[in-house]
Image (cartoon, rainbow, N blue to C red):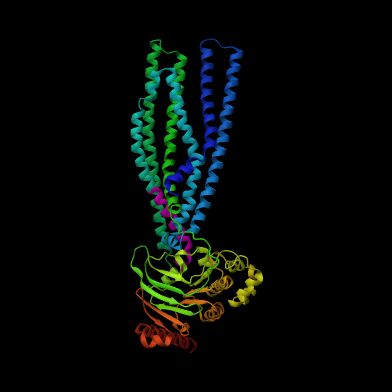
Amino acid sequence: MDTKTLTKQIKTKNKAADRYMTVSVLSGIATTFLVVWLVNLFITEQVSIQKIALAGGGIVLFQVMKAVFYAIGTGRAHDAAYRSLAEIRLDMVSHLKKLPLSFFQKRKTGDLANIINHDVEQIEIYLAHAQPEIKITLLLPALTALSMLAIDWRLGLALVAPFPVMVLYQKFVYKLWDKTLKRYIQSTKEMSEDLIEYISTMPAIKAFATDEQKTGAVLSRMRAYISWVKKIMYTVSVPLSMVQMLLEIGLVLVVIVGAGLMISGQLSLIRFILALILANLFSSSLIRYMSFHHADIVLGRSVESIATITGESPPPDYPRDPSLGPGDIELRDVTFSYDGREEALKEVSLTFRENTVNAIVGSSGSGKSTIASLIMGFWPVEQGNVTIGGKNIAAINEGDLSGLVSIVQQDTFLFNTTIAENIRIGRAEASKAEIMEAAQKARIHEMIDNLPEGYDTMVGEGGVKLSGGEKQRIAIARIILKNAPIIILDEATAAIDPYNEHLIQEAMTNLSQNKTLIIIAHHLNTIVNADQIIVMDGGRMIAGGKHRELLDTCPLYQEMVQAQKQVDHWEIKQTQEVWA
């Protein structure tokens, strides 16, 4: 949804509230006329009990109507605001689910969280508080100006005489407000992003003793935010004072013109009093309008931010294909870069045969994980194509593709819920028995069973209560439960201790039975029996074959194997020294 459509949708939510607010304003003006009429009765000595009762009853009635309709209008405005808030957030979450992973990898988590929380919250503030006041403060001056013209057209002209100057000045002020508010909003977002990052990375900050440096950076961002708050206050308050001065000129002109008309006998005292009341109401209403108008600018900026999510086009939603099944995975002349940067893959062509064990090796940045991301459909292929079973993955429904491919990554994320629920993510309808069976195959059941609460143990945010190896095995249990025909292991044992690595290797043996397995390898000794090993370098595939073949034909693979042997020898030597 674009900015214009979203803004229109938001601003038309308060139609019911507007009607009640209009009645409230009219009731207030009617009260003013009745008060002036009552004063006139006393001045002209035409007062009577009946007239006082009539005026008093009318004043009470209109004041009650003003209060009641204002309360109902405010309630309707808040109801519309919170409904809109919920609708927009639900729409955003629904839209985010449709976007490719590439969208999230390009955006900061703090930025997206700030939009969903802070920017959407501005819509509630606008609908519930600003818009009703803006409508009232626009309607009231219009009605008072018309009433003034009805009293005497010369007084009406005197009242609005400074108005053209004020409009021109207002345009200048709005540009100034827009520029300053834009920077203020940006400062707010930056502070929010830094705070989220600061809190989420606290373990690393503490571990590397960089708390003073990081805290200083966050405090610096906060000071910048406070500086912009002060600038906003100055930018808003000074122009408002100037507008008030211009409007006071209109009030002064009404006094001068009215006094002249009274002296010449063209205006009665009671009309003059009413004119002064209306002139004061006119100027105070416009001042209130100006003070609320910056909410329009804030809303505009918030809508622009929201539109960066809702305006992002999701990939085509292809229909589900029940006949779609596994098969060979092929990359044909694939060239790919992240956001126009240096090419991560360059004319890569390769095939992973169905139900075979495959490995991809290469230095960091050689393109190993990029191949996995493209097979998973996380990024759209720029040049060439990726097929599964002969079908281009670009034309496969997202749900179908997810059902075909599973991935176990080095950095496993667990949700802050029970172990059972984290495993059940693999298949939502799985029974407790099926969850336990998957855990047994993943070599994690014994550990879970020894916990006081077993499978009902809460893992903490991100699985903080579990070790890296335990989280990996829970992730493998998920994949076993999902039972997808294609498994990608993205350096799953790269940072795991030997005990957990042994258990994970056993779990992966169970996982890979009758599957197409693609291992992004870190330890070469784990993939020597693979049916195919792909060697990547600088985004290109430079060799492919079995372990023995590559040792004879690929110098780079020979170097990698030799380096692995040196690492293994160093680890053994270090262990011997420890136990000596």
Residue 422 appearing in the image: yes
Q: In which quarter of the image is residue 17?
A: top right
Q: Compared to 299, does 483 lie above or below? A: below
Residue 412 magenta:
no
The boundaries of the magenta stretch are 183-208
Q: Compared to 292, does 307 lie above or below? A: below
Q: What is the x, y in percent for residue 558?
A: 37, 85
The residue depicted at 54 percent of the width and 20 percent of the height is 34
Q: What is the x, y in percent for residue 46?
A: 55, 10
Residue 197 magenta:
yes
The secondary structure making up most of the magenta span is helix
The residue depicted at 38 percent of the width and 51 percent of the height is 224
Residue found farthest to the bottom:
580
Q: Compared to 160, does 190 lie above or below? A: below
Q: What is the x, y in percent for residue 437?
A: 63, 75
6 or 146: nearer the viewer? 6
Q: What is the x, y in percent for residue 129?
A: 50, 39
Q: Give the total number of marks visible in the rendering.
A: 0
25 or 431: nearer the viewer? 431
Residue 451 appearing in the image: no
Q: In this view, does 190 lie to the left or right of 500?
A: left
